Amino acid sequence: MICVAGLGVSGTAVARAMAGRGEKVVVLEGRDGERARVIAGELTALGVEVRFGEPAEPPAGTSLIVTTGWPPHHPLLAAAAAAGIEVIGEVELAWRLRPEGAAPWLALTGTNGKTTAVRMLTAMLLAAGHRALAVGNVGTPVVEAVTGPGDVLAVELSSFQLHRSPSIAPYAAAVLNVAPDHLDWHGSMEEYARVKGEIFARAGTIVHNADDEWAARLAAPYESAAGRGGAARSVGFTLAVPRPGQLGVVEDLLVDRAFVADPVGNAEELASLADIRPFAPHNVANALAAAALARAYGVPAAAVREGLLAFVPDPHRIAHVARVAEVDYVDDSKATNPHAAAASLAAYPSIVWVAGGQLKGADVGELVRRAAPRLRGAVLLGADRERIREALARHAGNVPVVEVAGQDTGVMDRVVTEAARLAAPGDTVLLAPAGASLDMFAGYPARGEAFARAVHRLAEGHDGGAA
């Protein structure tokens, strides 16, 4: 019997897939609710048993547990380990279910930028004529795609998914960056980084951010190994001028000195900085990572540029909302940890920072210290706003700070009003929270939408309107 831990998107996909193969499936779900009951009803019609409540022991007869993000210390998973029952993740199951001749995987992970990079990669593959699908943490469960029509999969993997994926072997794999996040889940920064590095273990080509200390460290053991076709197995990308074996930036061009016949003597132009939207240094890094994976798969340079031009950014990622009284308002609600917020803050010279939420055990001191010269003010909300205020007091004592308390629907209107009061013409009011949103909102999209609505209301009440 297959036991599926969790009734979310991935758990539901696993239950459907295994029931479709004639397996007896039991799904365990700790949280009850109307939506969960509807999904449970649909699965019951397929012969799947769904049990609600916090499970402490595997059901009798369980031969395999497929978990979809439950932490390693959960009592069910600990009991399974003690009983000798194998526990794997949805991604590992998908890998095992691949048919002969299945589509290769171009996989990537990182603390930030994963979804942007995987969508850029997919656009490049499509531009090259491939039937490419973006799957994994981007929203579509991998288990749904492994028997689908795509001839190559662009796979976004979180640390949760990599934690229990011991045999996946991507054609090429990339680590975009590694910074403190989900430490409450993994237990330590070292363990979090180790899990991220698992994406490299069986990959054909290793792609890493040469500007990121942890990513470079994870790639180091593979630098002397050979990849497919005898080519260098390890490829770096950098925002600087690339060395042989790297992709990077020369003046205003993205160039390749890795996937060319003579990396020492030649480089190939891939695109220009103007082709990257929205433009920010971290998005240039995302584009280079995507290009490296695409080039590892044989995508021509022209398709890299075509893919970048066709790429449409997801919402709530440094999205310009409006200009009011010569102040720009930008929604980067997806910046749910300090590393992402730092990248966002680095993109603007003069900022009124809107921050706060659930910091998930991360420290914000270094973020504030680096951003301090750019800050003109800060408006704080959410559960851990006091920790951000303390960091501002230590590292940016001259920056005016306003705290907005409360959990009601009018909080964001007060936040935007206070931010407008602190801002001067030429400033950017930037929502880059550095924390998760679930203390106040249904998710980071809801937080970003609340910010945008509040900005539009501000614009409507302003004589100059919004441009």
Image: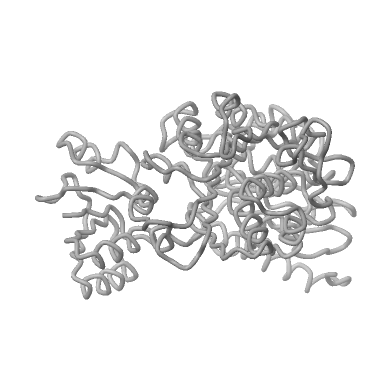
Res 6 quadrant in image: bottom left
Query: Residue lying furthest left in this view?
Result: 60
At 24% from the left and 64% from the top, the residue drawn is: 21
Write the residue at 84% across / 72% down. Answer: 465
Q: What is the number of callouts on the image? A: 0
Q: Quadrant of the C terminus?
A: bottom right
Residue at 37%, 55% in the rendered image: 98
Left or right of residue 10, residue 326 in this image: right
Q: Tell whether 200 sits left or right of 312.
A: left
Which is more toward the observer, 413 or 299? 299
Residue 164 x %, y % = 36, 41
- Point 64% across, 62% down: residue: 315
Q: Which x, y percent locates residue 209?
A: 66, 35
Left or right side of 344 for 327:
right
Query: Which image quadrant for residue 460?
Result: bottom right
Camera-side residue of 28 and 322: 28
Q: In which quarter of the image is the N terminus?
A: bottom left
In this view, 414 is above or below 56: below
**Residue 450, above or below 440:** below
Taking the image as shown, residue 261 lies to the left or right of residue 42, namely: right
Q: In which quarter of the image is residue 210?
A: top right
Picture coordinates of residue 301 (x, y %)? 76, 53
**Colouring chosen for the image of the structure:** one colour
Q: Where is residue 154 in the image (x, y as percent from the top left)?
A: 55, 55
